[in-house]
């Protein structure tokens, strides 16, 4: 699996957009980028995934650079409930074994 | 809603005991996973299974075994518990078809303490 690099922690003001970066410079052509988050004392929760194109759902947007070596997860209007650890993961299509790193701890500040 | 349940939220066992952690999912998912989570180390994959009676080693299988006799149930077994197996254990499941096969659904976790 390709490895990812994320900042250890970030702060974001409530109501502002939270932009969480992820570097995956060794990503292969068939590997997807996907994001999970883990709120304290809960299991991780899937957020979004993408291959090449930018993606948006009701939770977030995923922006993948053209060379696919990095991506950004965007929470458009962060709330206090978005305080969590966010994991960026890359894995080949159809391959079920994924490796979670240590993620980014996002603190949303009132 | 997909539901993944784990048999206990908290468990305390003694060194040398045989420990069973049970996980059940109700969405007919083919794939099931066991992770452990430790501070500073993130989630690490212990074992996974992509079908009944099938299993694959993850990144840290030593000291663990698994059993999958029914599609909905995946058990993690600590044959002889040791203190370094004190951890949070998380079970997950996913389906094996289409783009949503990358979405894993997690249970609430079992915090195991081995004394």
Image (cartoon, coloured by chain):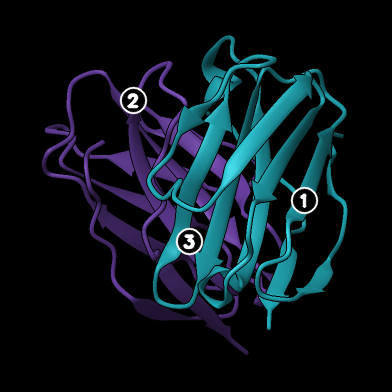
Chain colours: A purple, B cyan
Q: Nearer the viewer, residue B3 or A78?
A: B3
State if disc 2 and disc 1 touch (CB < 8 Å).
no
Q: Residues within 10 Å of mark 1 (few under 14, many from 20)?
A: some
Q: Which quadrant holds the C terminus of chain A?
A: bottom right
Furthest residue toward top: B97
Q: Residue at x 55, y 58 (%)?
A: B36
Q: Is residue A75 left or right of residue A27?
A: right
Residue behind mark 1: B20
Check contact, mark 3 vs mark 1: CB within 8 A: no
Label 2 chain ID? A
Q: Quick one: A77 or B27, which is closer to the camera? A: B27
Residue A24, image quadrant: top left
> Which SS class for mark 1?
strand
> CA separation, marks 2 and 3?
19 Å
Q: Residue A16 placed where, x, y %? A: 51, 72
The x, y position of residue B42, in whole percent, is 44, 64
Q: Quadrant of the N terminus of chain A?
A: top left
Is residue A8 visible in the rendered image? The answer is yes
**Quick check: B85 above or below A98?**
below
The answer to whether the residues at label 2 and label 3 have Cβ atoms under 8 Å apart is no
- Residue B9 vs B56, above or below: the answer is below
Q: Quadrant of residue B114?
A: bottom right
A100 shown above or below B74: below
Chain letter of the residue carrying label 3:
A
Q: Are marks 1 and 2 on the same chain?
A: no
Point out which mark residue A86 bears: 3
Residue sitting at 82 percent across and 71 percent down?
B10
Report which residue position mark 2 lands on: A51
Q: Residue furthest bottom?
A: A110
Q: CA distance from mark 3 to mark 1?
A: 30 Å
């Amino acid at each position: 699996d390709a490895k990812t690099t994320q900042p250890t922690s970030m702060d974001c003001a409530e109501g502002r957009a939270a932009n969480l970066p992820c570097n995956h410079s060794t990503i292969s052509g068939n590997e997807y980028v996907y994001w999970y988050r883990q709120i304290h004392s809960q299991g991780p929760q899937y957020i979004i995934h993408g291959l090449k194109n930018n993606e948006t759902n009701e939770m977030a947007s995923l922006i993948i650079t053209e060379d696919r070596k990095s991506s950004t997860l965007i929470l458009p209007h962060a709330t206090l409930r978005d305080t969590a650890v966010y994991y960026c993961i890359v894995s080949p299509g159809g391959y079920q074994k994924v490796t979670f790193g240590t993620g980014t701890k996002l603190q949303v500040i009132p | 809603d997909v539901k993944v349940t784990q048999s206990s939220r908290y468990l305390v066992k003694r060194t040398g005991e045989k420990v069973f952690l049970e996980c059940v999912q109700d969405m007919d998912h083919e794939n099931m996973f066991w992770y452990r989570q430790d501070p500073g180390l993130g989630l690490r994959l212990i074992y996974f299974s992509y079908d009944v009676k099938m299993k694959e080693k993850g990144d840290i299988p030593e000291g663990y075994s698994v059993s999958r006799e029914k599609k909905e149930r995946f058990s993690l077994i600590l044959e002889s518990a040791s203190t370094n197996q004190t951890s949070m254990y998380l079970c997950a499941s996913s389906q094996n078809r289409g783009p949503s096969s990358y979405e894993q659904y997690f249970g609430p976790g079992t915090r195991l303490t081995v004394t």
